[in-house]
Image (spheres, rainbow, N blue to C red):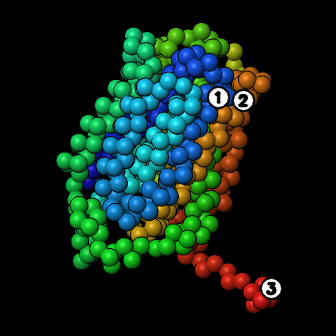
């Protein structure tokens, strides 16, 4: 298990760093291509549109061909498109490249989730996943500290070429050292992960896509992820620009300041995973108070005139919100049958990526029309949505299965005859 966790941690670290780079260089891109804040927001949301659209297809590919194989495809493709972003020469080309980059990264999360599930025992899964997903927050710490000085010396394009090289290194490591899946009873390794063609019988055992998508309970967890990611991606996108435009902070200094809440998020993500294991689900006990604190901190952050206050309240908001990340996945991953994990996990992730589509341009438009204070205040809506959905979802695996396995109501004869 440990080697699997290390390799997935590295792959996710590069994945998240690649998508964070755009936020740090957005002011430079905006200046070079003469973009207003709304257009800059669309540069970010172009990625998330493709990313969201490819989550469920990515889960289907992982269930069909195996998590390892799809993970390798994703690493190669997104590294290529990251490098090409450094050659963009217009707003339209930049949008196209970011969309293609989103397609490549979009198939990765469900494949990586399947890789982890197939190589861990159920009782250690949430802790392992919490460690893997803490890579996102670690990337948020490292990326600004590494990229800001690089951009200051070599320009914004160099940031994309450097992260693309890291993606290729992660590809080589996963290909060489990822362990085989754990045996499942007498069935042996999961189909497709040993490089052999998937058996027809195994493919036939995969549930129809419609059957998975009709599980309404999954979409409630997806809405919870939407609320969480509204906060995270709203802040990730606009805090560097806010610090530069409103407080005159240099890119290097902004990178250091952005790393402070990111470090809190890394700690909270791991802590949230441990709490999920200890509570056996019951995400409401973590998410509702966490989002309450986050909402209050966001309001204070948006309205403080002090740079110190902005960083302190922002760190508190991100820490409290990040406690929710792993609990959102805890019950579905425990309650879903193995053959549902790829697509089922993708459904939940889609909600977060829709937030990435919506939040950046909406906040950009609010900042253009009103102020950054109004734009940051908008993020409170994300905390409210996550907290409400936490109260409207099953709190343990047994309750989840009871709801998920409930047969859809058949139409009445009168309706059929109509």
The CA span between labels 2 and 1 is: 9 Å
Residue, disc 2? 365
Element carrying mark 3: loop
Report the residue at 30% width, 55% height from top.
Answer: 68
Rendering coords of residue 171 (x, y %): 28, 42
The CA span between labels 3 and 1 is: 48 Å
Report the residue at 53% width, 64% height from top.
Answer: 396
Disc 1 crowd, CA 10 A, few/some/many (<14, 14-19, 20+): some
Residue 89 appears in view: yes
228 to the left or right of 339: right
Quarter of the figure with residue 293: top right
Residue, disc 1? 39
Q: Is residue 283 above or below residue 92?
A: below
The CA span between labels 3 and 2 is: 47 Å
Rendering coords of residue 400 (x, y %): 55, 68
Q: How many marks?
A: 3
Q: Which sits in the foreground, 196 or 253?
A: 196
Quarter of the figure with residue 168: top left
92 to the left or right of 299: left
Label located before the other in sequence (3 or 1)? 1
Q: Nearer the viewer, mark 3 or mark 2?
A: 3
Report the residue at 39% width, 21% height from top.
Answer: 158
- Screen quadrant of the C terminus: bottom right
Report the residue at 43% width, 45% height from top.
Answer: 104
Q: Is residue 72 above or below residue 24?
A: below
Element carrying mark 2: helix
Residue, disc 3? 418
Label located before the other in sequence (3 or 2)? 2
Disc 2 crowd, CA 10 A, few/some/many (<14, 14-19, 20+): many
Q: Nearer the viewer, mark 2 or mark 1?
A: 1
Residue 307 appears in view: no
């Amino acid at each position: 298990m440990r080697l699997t966790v290390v390799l997935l941690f590295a792959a996710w670290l590069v994945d998240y760093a690649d998508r964070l780079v755009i936020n740090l260089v957005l002011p430079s891109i905006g200046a070079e291509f003469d973009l207003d804040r709304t257009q800059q927001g669309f540069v970010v949301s172009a990625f998330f549109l493709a990313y969201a659209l490819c989550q469920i297809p990515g889960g289907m590919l992982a269930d069909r061909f195996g998590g390892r194989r799809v993970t390798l495809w994703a690493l190669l493709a997104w590294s290529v498109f990251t490098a090409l972003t450094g050659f963009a020469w217009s707003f339209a080309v930049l949008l196209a490249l970011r969309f293609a980059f989103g397609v490549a990264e979009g198939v990765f999360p469900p494949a990586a989730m399947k890789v982890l599930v197939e190589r861990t025992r159920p009782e250690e899964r949430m802790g392992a996943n919490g460690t893997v997903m803490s890579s996102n927050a670690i990337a948020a710490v490292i990326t600004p500290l590494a990229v800001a000085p690089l951009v200051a010396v070599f320009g914004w394009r160099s940031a994309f070429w450097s992260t693309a090289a890291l993606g290729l290194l992660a590809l080589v490591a996963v290909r060489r050292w990822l362990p085989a899946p754990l045996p499942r009873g007498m069935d042996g390794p999961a189909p497709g992960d040993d490089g052999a063609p998937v058996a027809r019988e195994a493919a036939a055992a995969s549930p129809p896509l419609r059957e998975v998508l009709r599980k309404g309970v999954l979409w409630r967890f997806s809405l919870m992820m939407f609320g969480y990611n509204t906060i995270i991606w709203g802040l990730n996108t606009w805090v560097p620009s806010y610090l530069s435009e409103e407080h005159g902070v240099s890119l290097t200094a902004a990178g250091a300041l952005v790393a402070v809440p990111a470090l809190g998020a890394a700690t909270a993500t791991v802590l949230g995973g441990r709490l999920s294991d200890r509570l056996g689900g019951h995400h409401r006990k973590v998410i509702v108070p966490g989002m309450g604190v986050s909402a209050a901190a966001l309001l204070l952050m948006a309205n403080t005139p002090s740079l110190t206050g902005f960083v302190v309240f922002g760190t508190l908001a991100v820490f409290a919100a990040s406690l929710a990340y792993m609990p959102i996945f805890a019950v579905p991953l425990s309650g879903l049958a193995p053959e549902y994990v790829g697509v089922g996990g993708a459904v939940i992730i889609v909600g977060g990526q829709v937030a990435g589509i919506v939040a950046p341009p909406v906040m950009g438009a609010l900042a253009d029309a009103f102020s950054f204070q109004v734009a940051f205040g908008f993020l409170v809506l994300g905390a409210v949505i996550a907290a409400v959905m936490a109260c409207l979802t099953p709190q343990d695996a047994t309750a989840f299965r009871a709801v998920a396995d409930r047969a859809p109501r058949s139409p009445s004869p009168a309706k059929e005859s109509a």
